[in-house]
């Protein structure tokens, strides 16, 4: 059972108990059991409607939302404009990117201590999370950030950003560039002692990076 189903079941149990305790038992009955309070039927109907609405919410990573020069419903400013919610993935990104250079371990550590939007819980993104920001362009145009994105100070000069994902070679981690070139040029493995910026994200999952 998923978390949203557990939530609905838990809410139903609590509300049923409250109805039985605090409301008089009035309403219809039959020979097979005690009467059912009308207000209880109303509560159960509302819970059924809530469950139906939850069932119709698609997983975030299955969506493909518009973000171009005309409109960008994919991204929304949150935390008083300090961060950006990506409605495609459910991830929250720093809006203004700190491009200070760090080693791989240093980038991981600085994200753990950052409090963008006066909120803790940030981390260095996995390679899959950072890749999710790259938008394919039609007509052979090289992929990069979506055209209508609201981010500030993202390096597009070929610089690479750290990810929390270790590379296939020992002592290296995946890095990603938002500059020119194919995805093979943009996604590489680099020595973890090199100095590169890290772009912090909130939400989703992160590997136990330092154990890799």
Image (cartoon, helix red, strand yellow):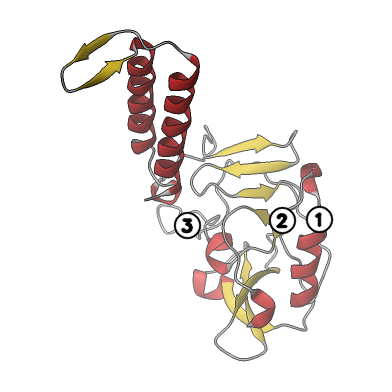
**Labels 2 & 1 near each other (Cβ < 8 A):** yes
| Alpha carbons under labels 2 and 1: distance apart | 7 Å
- Residue at 68 percent across and 64 percent down: it is 124
In the drawing, what numbered circle is on residue 114?
Answer: 1
Q: Is residue 190 left or right of residue 140?
A: right
> Is the residue marked by circle 1 packed among few (<14), some (14-19), or many (20+) residues within 10 Å?
some
Earlier sequence position, callout 2 versus callout 1: 1
Residue 142 is situated, as x and y percent measured from the top left of the image, at 50, 60
Local secondary structure at mark 3:
loop
- Of residues 110 and 182, the one nearer the viewer is 110
Q: CA distance from mark 3 to mark 1?
A: 35 Å
**In screen coordinates, is 194 left or right of 20?**
right
The residue under the point 79% across, 77% down is: 103
Distance from the alpha carbon under mark 3 to that under mark 2 = 32 Å
Q: Give coordinates of residue 186: x percent, y percent.
A: 57, 71
Q: Residue at x 34, y 35 (%)?
A: 56
Mark 3 vs mark 1: give the one in front: 1
- How packed mark 2 is, by other alpha carbons closer than 10 Å (few <14, some 14-19, many 20 or more), is many
> For mark 3, what is the residue?
141
Q: Percent position (x, y) of residue 185?
A: 56, 74
Q: Earlier in the sequence, mark 3 or mark 1?
A: 1
The vertical placement of 122 against 33, above or below, is below
Q: Is residue 164 visible?
A: yes
Quadrant into which the C terminus falls: bottom right
Numbered tag placed on residue 122 in the rendering: 2
Question: In the image, is 190 to the left or to the right of 118?
Answer: left
* Sequence-earlier tag: 3 or 2: 2
Task: Indicate the secondary structure of the residue bearing disc 2.
Answer: strand
């Amino acid at each position: 059972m998923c978390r949203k189903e557990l939530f609905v079941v838990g809410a139903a149990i609590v509300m049923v108990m409250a109805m039985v305790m605090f409301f008089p038992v009035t309403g219809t009955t039959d020979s097979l059991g005690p009467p059912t309070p009308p207000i209880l039927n109303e509560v159960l109907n509302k819970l059924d409607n809530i469950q139906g609405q939850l069932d119709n919410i698609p997983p975030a990573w299955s969506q493909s939302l518009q973000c171009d020069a005309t409109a960008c419903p994919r991204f929304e400013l949150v935390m008083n404009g300090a961060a950006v919610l990506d409605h495609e993935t459910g991830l929250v990104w720093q809006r203004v990117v700190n491009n200070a250079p760090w080693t791989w371990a240093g980038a991981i550590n600085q994200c753990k201590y950052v409090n963008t939007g006066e909120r803790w819980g940030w981390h260095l993104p996995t390679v899959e999370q950072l890749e999710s920001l790259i938008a394919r362009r039609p007509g052979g145009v090289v992929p990069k950030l979506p055209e209508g994105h609201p981010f500030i100070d993202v390096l597009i000069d070929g610089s690479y950003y750290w990810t929390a994902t270790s590379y296939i070679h020992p002592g290296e981690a995946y890095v990603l560039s938002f500059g020119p070139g194919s995805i093979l040029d943009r996604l590489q493995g680099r020595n973890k002692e090199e100095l590169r910026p890290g772009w912090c994200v909130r939400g989703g999952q992160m590997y136990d990076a330092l154990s890799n």
